[in-house]
Amino acid sequence: MRQLRFSPWIGIAAFVVGALALRVLSHSLLRGGIPAADQGFRPVALSRGPGDPPVFAYWMSGTGGEGEKILRLLKAVYHPRNSYLLHLDADSTAGERRRLALAIQSDRIFKAFANVEVVGKPHAVDRTGSSVLAAAVNGAAVLLKISSDWDWFINLSASDYPVVTQDDLLHAFTSLPRDLNFIDHTSDLGWKESERFDKIIVDPSLHMDKNTESFFASETRATPDAFTLFTGSPWFILSRPFVEHCVHSWDNFPRKLLMYFANVAYSMESYFQTVICNSPEFRNTTVNSDLRYFLWDDPPGLDPRFLNQSQYKEMIKSGAAFARRFMEDDSVLEKIDKKILRRSPNGVGVGKWCLGRPGGRKRKELEEDPCSSWGDINVVVPGPSGKRLRSLVSGLISDEKLRSNQCRFA
Ligand SMILES: *[C@@H]1O[C@H](CO)[C@@H](O)[C@H](O)[C@H]1NC(C)=O
Ligand SMILES: *[C@@H]1O[C@H](CO)[C@@H](O)[C@H](O)[C@H]1NC(C)=O
Ligand SMILES: CC(=O)N[C@H]1CO[C@H](CO)[C@@H](O)[C@@H]1O
């Protein structure tokens, strides 16, 4: 019998649900390429030794009208070590996507480090359905392909904002085992069992060009008994080995689950949780937290409350890495920019890699981006918010806390 040989790329291709041909608008010629004309550009090598900071891969999604919001978020979470993949979904116009790509192409820093990409052909998504999950899995697959350096995958939406600097985040993760997955999860399904898992949802965004609302079928189905369902927060920080497992493993479980979850409402709150907790080789890598700050109404609605100045203190004190939701240009974002990120207007979040002096007294100095000249990208120095994040993470992964919260089967 002839043996079929599969390359991993066939595996990926098969996985890209709906055969969404993805085109990435590349904005730069070479990774790390240095245009000779500009004297400011210097080669900087990414160092990946055991004591070096990790590398994050960001999947950042927005919808029509959110181009500016996502650009601001990108600047707030920017660090030359990381990789960024930006997506404006099918609700956005070609003009909006072009403007975003142009804004990135024309930025001197993004151009020099060549680590920001924009999805050229948008995905139609409905967050109630599974199309948003298909888009995120595809984002992860593309990030695996375009960068072999990253350690963790982070999912952000245009309504999120960091409450720590990238130096803080990189520092807090430097000493962690690289296989840990920060994923909020529980097998206590509560009302979700009948309202989400037993109902059958159909998501037309999987087969239509534009974002299209999902609908429920009149039939219901039994709760699975071949595996245990887990659910939780749709925001996570996933390890590279686990993302690889979901995207191109020989194990059929992640793929089979993806097909089951195609008809589960809000599958992004349960897919990765169910895969990881039913996979003995990954179960012990879970940390039951999403490291985010939210404020829920009582009783909680679908989305957390919009945050504003009145939550600033509590948000910072929480030690979380990110918070949501924010209105576009809310004044609290300016406060975060100024106090935490020390971003100049239009500049990127300041880190040790930036050689300029942030926040001079004179107005002119203030407007100059301290990151317009740079040094070593392998050194990070945390601020006070980094120390809070680190102590939050240390608490979460301390032995008793970690083990007792991992994938408990109800
Ligand atoms: C996971 O942890 C449990 C309990 O500590 C242990 O029995 C099991 O062998 C571990 N599994 C793996 C794959 O390390
Ligand atoms: C800020 O948030 C609080 C709590 O959610 C809310 O009561 C208040 O009205 C908000 N303030 C503004 C100015 O939006
Ligand atoms: C799995 C997943 O896609 N989770 C979230 C990632 O970000 C998108 C974009 O905003 C969210 O909608 C998803 O819920």
Image: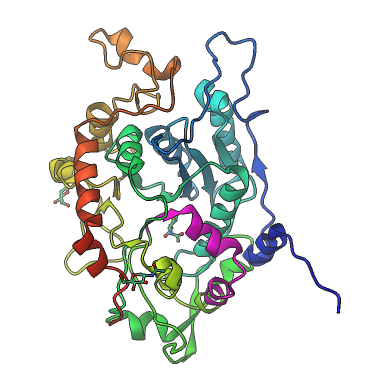
Query: Is residue 320 covered in magenta?
Result: no
- The percent coordinates of residue 257 (x first, y second) are 52, 76
Q: Can residue 243 be seen in this view?
A: yes
Along the line of sight, the residue nearer the viewer: 195 or 50:
50
- The percent coordinates of residue 139 (x first, y second) are 55, 53
- Magenta residues, dominant SS class: helix
Query: Is residue 246 covered in magenta?
Result: yes
What residue is shown at x 38% (from left), y 26% (from top)? Answer: 379
Q: Quadrant of residue 398?
A: bottom left
Q: In which quarter of the image is the N terminus?
A: bottom right
The span shown in magenta is 235-258
Report the coloring of the rendering: rainbow
Along the line of sight, the residue nearer the viewer: 298 or 267:
267
Q: Quadrant of residue 123?
A: bottom right
Q: In this view, does 89 lie to the left or right of 295?
A: right
Q: Is residue 185 left or right of residue 281?
A: left
Q: Is residue 57 above or below residue 368?
A: below
Q: Quadrant of the C terminus?
A: bottom left
